[in-house]
Each structure stands twice: as C-alpha cells, then as structure tokens.
Image (spheres, rainbow, N blue to C red):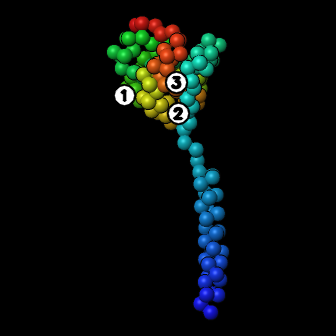
C-alpha cells in the first residue's frame, strides 16, 4: 500500500507547487528592465562616426592616457569624474554617445552610469582604443 501511495503523493506535491513555479516565472518575465546600453565593434563604430551617427565621442580614460592619443574630436572625462559631470553632458542625453577607454572595461561602467542617468542611446566601444588601433583606425595625438 505504501508503494502505491508514493506516486500519488508525488502527483499531489507537483499539483500543489506547479502554480507557484508558474507565478514566479511570470513575475520574472515582467520585472522592470535595467538601464541599457550596448557594445559596438571598432569597424561598425568607425562607420557610424563617418556617417555622422555619433553625436558625442566620450573618452573616459585618465588625462595622461588621453594625451597619448584619442579618437578624433573626443571629449575627455575620466570615469571617476563622470558622475560629477553629468550636467555638462545633458545636451547629449537623447543623442548617440560612443564611450571608450583603453580596453572597454571602464567604458562599460561609464556606459551603465550614463544609461542609469537617462541617456537613451549609449554605445560602448568593444575592446576600447586598443581594438580601435588594432583595426588600423586613426587616433589623434593630443
């Protein structure tokens, strides 16, 4: 008799827990989205810049790094000073902003900060200026 009860108990347990599992899945699916940004490879970023599709090039490296070379027409605001300079960037809030650093790590953090501050079209240069130079694209010495 116990052996016959085990399958019934298992079915009863599944019937009881299934609605909770479905409810949890629905809550996850409708959870609010976090601020978003995306990464773009050097070749696509270069084409976008050449076609006038980037309104702000933002270099978030240190001033010393910026002085060694930067993308043409880039603005320099180090990542650790970005939060304090959001007002300066306000005119670009609804425009395309391409953010880069040396390798892409700091610019990813900066992209997240900008997106959370309400910037609507933020692109992170995948691989940073190292990938840009590795693709043979131009930098300006400062």
Q: Residue at (45%, 32%) from the top-left corner?
A: 109
Residue that numbered label 2 is attached to: 115
Q: Is residue 100 visible?
A: no
Answer yes or no: do the residues labelled 1 and 2 have beta carbons within 8 Å? Answer: no
Q: Can you name the residue that lies furthest to the left here?
A: 64
Question: Upstream in the sequence, badge 1 or badge 2?
Answer: 1
Closest to the observer: 38 or 85? 38
Label 2: few (<14), some (14–19) or many (≥20) C-alpha neighbours in 10 Å:
some
Q: Residue at (61%, 67%) from the top-left corner?
A: 20
**In this rendering, the label closer to the viewer, 3 or 1:** 3
Question: Upstream in the sequence, badge 2 or badge 3?
Answer: 2
Q: Is residue 81 left or right of residue 13?
A: left
CA separation in Å, label 1 and label 2: 16 Å
Q: Which mark is residue 125?
A: 3
Label 3: few (<14), some (14–19) or many (≥20) C-alpha neighbours in 10 Å:
many
CA separation in Å, label 2 and label 3: 15 Å
Q: Position of residue 34 (x, y in %)?
A: 54, 42
Local secondary structure at mark 2: helix
Residue that numbered label 1 is attached to: 80
Local secondary structure at mark 1: helix
Q: Residue at (49%, 20%) from the top-left corner?
A: 131
Quarter of the image where the C terminus is located: top left
Closest to the observer: 38 or 30? 38
Local secondary structure at mark 3: strand
CA separation in Å, label 3 and label 1: 18 Å
Quarter of the image where the N terminus is located: bottom right
């Amino acid at each position: 008799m116990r052996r016959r009860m085990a399958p019934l108990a298992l079915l009863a347990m599944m019937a009881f827990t299934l609605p909770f599992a479905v409810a949890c899945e629905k809550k996850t699916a409708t959870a609010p989205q976090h601020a978003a940004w995306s990464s773009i490879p050097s070749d696509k970023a270069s084409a976008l810049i050449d076609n006038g599709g980037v309104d702000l090039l933002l270099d978030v490296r240190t001033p010393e790094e910026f002085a060694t070379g930067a993308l043409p027409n880039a603005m320099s605001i180090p990542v650790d000073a970005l939060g304090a300079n959001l007002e300066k960037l306000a005119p670009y809030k609804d425009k395309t902003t391409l953010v880069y650093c040396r390798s892409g790590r700091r610019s990813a953090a900066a992209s997240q900060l900008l997106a959370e501050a309400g910037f609507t079209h933020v692109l992170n240069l995948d691989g940073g200026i190292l990938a840009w130079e590795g693709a043979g694209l131009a930098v300006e010495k400062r």
